[in-house]
Amino acid sequence: MQAGLGCLLVWLTRAPVGLRPPRLWAGLRLGAAAAAVTTTAIAASAPVPVVRLSMSERELPSSAPGWLVLHIPFGTVWAEEAAFRAALATAGTQAFGPVGGRLLQAGAFGLSHIADARATGAPAVPTVLVTGLAGWVFGWLAERSGSLAAPILTHLAINEAGAVAALAVQRRQASAAGTLARRYT
């Protein structure tokens, strides 16, 4: 449903998505580089105790494959990139110019994560600031490459790497707890 809504918003605003060559190639190159950096940063932060604790306490969906293969790429990443970086950025740029358009989509992107923050018990203000900054960077990637492929790959890398890291931390803890329980029974 969210992916379909993203497509509808792109169609209604006639937002350029740059998913055909040569813009697609530029988006894939820039997006792959940004995705590599973000994935490395997430992997490097996973062993940090406060990050690992947060990952271990996170409530994960019951179907990891469905979450990783369908929900994150289509229900989250495509839907948000189509809505914010394509549709809202296009409308905002037409109304307020390039900087105003990017500020609008980044601010709206940040504010759209308040419900997620509340659902997970995370503080809303830092969540809005961090996701708003991410929205600004995603907008820059889209503008720089002329393609939604760049922010899509970067956004996908952030969400997937975080999900895989949380799954790994929780599985490792479950395995360790099982080993410990067998040892003392």
Image (cartoon, grey):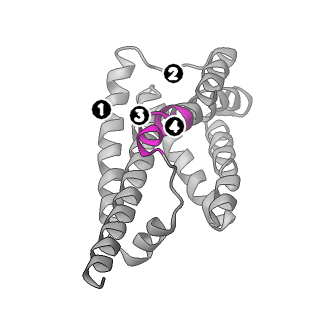
Q: Decide: marks 4, 2 in contact (CB < 8 A)?
A: no
Towards the viewer: 126 or 89: 126
Name the N-terminal-most of marks 4 and 2. Answer: 2
Q: How far apart are marks 4 and 2 (CA)?
A: 21 Å
Q: How far apart are marks 1 and 3 (CA)?
A: 7 Å
Dot 4 amino acid type? His
Residue 150: mark: 3
Q: How far apart are marks 3 and 2 (CA)?
A: 10 Å
Mark count? 4
Dot 3 amino acid type? Ala
Residue under label 4, please give it. 71
How busy is the neighbourhood of tag 1: few (under 14 within 10 Å), some, or many (20 plus)?
Answer: some
x 58%, y 32%: residue? 79
Displayed quadrant of residue 165: bottom left
| Label 3 secondary element | helix
Figure check: 58 above or below 163: below
Dot 2 amino acid type? Val
Residue under label 1, please give it. 29
